[in-house]
């Protein structure tokens, strides 16, 4: 069972010993019906489907506006950009930047002219913020703040601290030139502040939720600032948009959604582990976990998303995956071609007994470790889905982003949940606001204090 699209190859052969063709066919019918709901926009959450057309309808003027910010800050010799946001407001950009960056960019002497991108507003750690400001104080800094409301606690706290520093260091007028806000078009605290201070702004589309926003300015601006080609990324996403727009048994998003729901419903596979064999894709796992976890984990349903990076995690999580409770299946993101070449040499002493590998590319060893692991895990009772891209570059990442977004929508509709809301996210916030004694939460504060005193 090998299925092809323009840039994604989906291999379901690692599931064939676990499921029957009849069962798979049944779930393909369900997935085709769910695809129809997503395509025709008739399901719950259909007012949050703006992400579907982003690849083909992102205007060139938006990209140029991002590049103008980049060029302006380069003219000021800005060498550090703090991107402030949480959840979907930073994970897509971080995924793309980490995937496209040199693994040791920070340590290289010749770093180039593109600024370093660091992230804040995704936690409430005092140590993290203090150490961030240690870095900011040594560099020529600017800031991108991403928040639809401007009042989400984590990014609002970080922005208040960074903004204060920029204004004290550069003066209010110059600080305003070093702050860009990505926010609501018309309302909210951040929009109001941007109007007052004269910040340049980009719009978070009302019909695109945070976890689907990587191809909006939320992701595009930081990626441009980091020096990467968002036109290629959008081009790859547009190719996937075309490939997934057909209701067909060859549609890989339909196939992926069908198989993962079959494994969940019929075989109790309640955990999906996203596996990559390249450390550049660590944050693909983090982005993917939010995408699927926040989209499907509701109403007492959903597949729990986890991720590992191998071969590293074969020496930690590998034991559980191979031999632990059989509650999981794996989805492997396979990269067919390395962008670099390293060949193993010969050693006269051969004390490490590696001369049998002399002349081989390191990536060949990685591929054989991946294949060997796949076979071992299947033998150990773990079904395998494999998603292949040609290489790690902006074009393929754009396609992969769009593939997972579309497949997530189809899968959630099979599951019977609204893919585009997140009601459970608010529960912790209400408790936190009460504990922080936020005005308006007095009754909740009293109730919680009474509860904690028991």
Image (cartoon, rainbow, N blue to C red):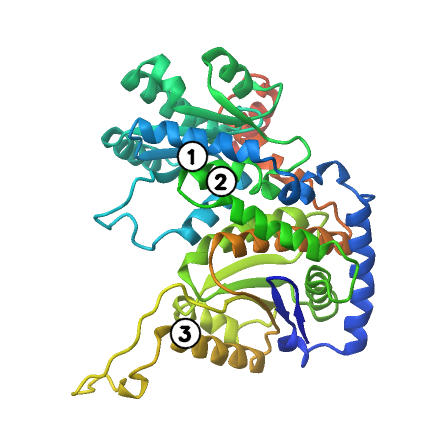
Q: In the rendered image, is residue 454 in sight? A: no
Outermost left residue: 349
Describe the element under mark 3 as helix, strand or loop.
Answer: helix
Horizontal and vertical percent position of residue 386: 59, 69
Do the numbered discs 1 and 2 sit on residues whose CB atoms are within 8 Å?
Answer: yes
| Image side of residue 258 versus residue 145, left or right | right
Q: Find the distance from the CA under tag 3 to the CA under tag 2.
A: 30 Å
Which numbered circle lies on residue 366?
Answer: 3
Cα distance in 3D space between marks 1 and 3: 34 Å
Disc 1 secondary structure class: strand
- Position above or below: 210 against 326: above
| Picture quadrant of residue 439 | top right
Q: Residues within 10 Å of mark 1 (few under 14, many from 20)?
A: many
According to the image, label 1 marks what residue? Answer: 83
Marks 1/2: CA–CA distance: 8 Å
Which of the 4 quarters of the picture holds residue 187?
top right
Pointer 3: residues within 10 angstroms few (<14), some, or many (20+)?
A: some
Q: Position of residue 311 (x, y in %)?
A: 41, 70
Q: Which residue is mark 2?
A: 90
């Amino acid at each position: 069972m090998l299925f092809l699209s323009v840039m994604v190859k989906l291999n379901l052969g690692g599931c064939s010993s676990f499921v029957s063709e009849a069962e798979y066919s049944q779930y393909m019918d369900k997935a085709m019906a769910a695809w129809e709901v997503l395509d025709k926009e008739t399901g719950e959450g259909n007012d949050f489907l703006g992400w579907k057309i982003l690849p083909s309808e992102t205007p060139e003027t938006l990209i140029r506006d991002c590049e103008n910010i980049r060029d302006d800050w380069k003219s000021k010799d800005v060498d550090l950009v703090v991107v402030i946001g949480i959840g979907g407001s930073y994970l897509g950009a971080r995924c793309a930047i980490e995937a496209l960056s040199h693994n040791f960019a920070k340590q290289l002497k010749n770093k180039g002219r593109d600024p370093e991108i660091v992230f804040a507003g995704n936690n409430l750690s005092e140590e993290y913020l203090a150490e961030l400001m240690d870095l900011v104080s040594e560099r020529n800094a600017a800031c991108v703040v991403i928040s639809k409301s401007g009042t989400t606690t984590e990014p609002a706290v970080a922005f208040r601290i960074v903004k204060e520093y920029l204004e004290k260091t550069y003066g209010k007028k110059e600080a305003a030139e070093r702050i860009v806000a990505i926010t609501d078009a018309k309302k909210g605290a951040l929009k109001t502040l941007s109007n007052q201070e004269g910040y340049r702004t980009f719009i978070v589309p009302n019909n695109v939720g945070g976890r689907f926003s990587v191809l909006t300015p939320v992701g595009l601006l930081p990626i441009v600032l980091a020096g990467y080609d968002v036109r290629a990324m959008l081009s790859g996403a547009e190719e996937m948009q075309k490939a997934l727009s057909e209701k067909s048994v060859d549609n890989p998003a339909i196939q992926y959604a069908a198989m993962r729901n079959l494994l969940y419903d019929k075989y109790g596979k309640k955990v999906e582990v996203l596996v990559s064999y390249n450390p550049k894709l660590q944050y693909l796992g983090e982005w993917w976990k939010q995408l699927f976890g926040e989209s499907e984990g509701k109403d007492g349903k959903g597949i729990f998303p986890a991720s590992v990076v191998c071969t590293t995690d074969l020496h930690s999580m590998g034991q559980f995956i191979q031999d632990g409770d059989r509650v999981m299946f794996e989805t492997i993101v396979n990269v067919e071609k390395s962008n670099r070449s390293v060949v193993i040499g010969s050693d006269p002493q051969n004390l490490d007994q590696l001369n049998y590998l002399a002349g081989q590319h390191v990536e060949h060893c990685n591929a054989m470790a991946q294949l060997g692991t796949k076979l071992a895990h299947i033998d150990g009772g773990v079904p395998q889905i494999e998603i292949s891209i040609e290489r790690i570059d902006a074009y393929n990442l754009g396609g992969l982003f769009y593939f997972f977004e579309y497949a997530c929508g189809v899968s959630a509709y099979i599951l019977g949940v609204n893919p585009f809301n997140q009601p459970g996210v608010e529960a912790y916030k209400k408790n936190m606001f009460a504990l922080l004694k936020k005005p308006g939460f007095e009754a909740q504060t009293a109730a919680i204090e009474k509860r904690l005193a028991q």
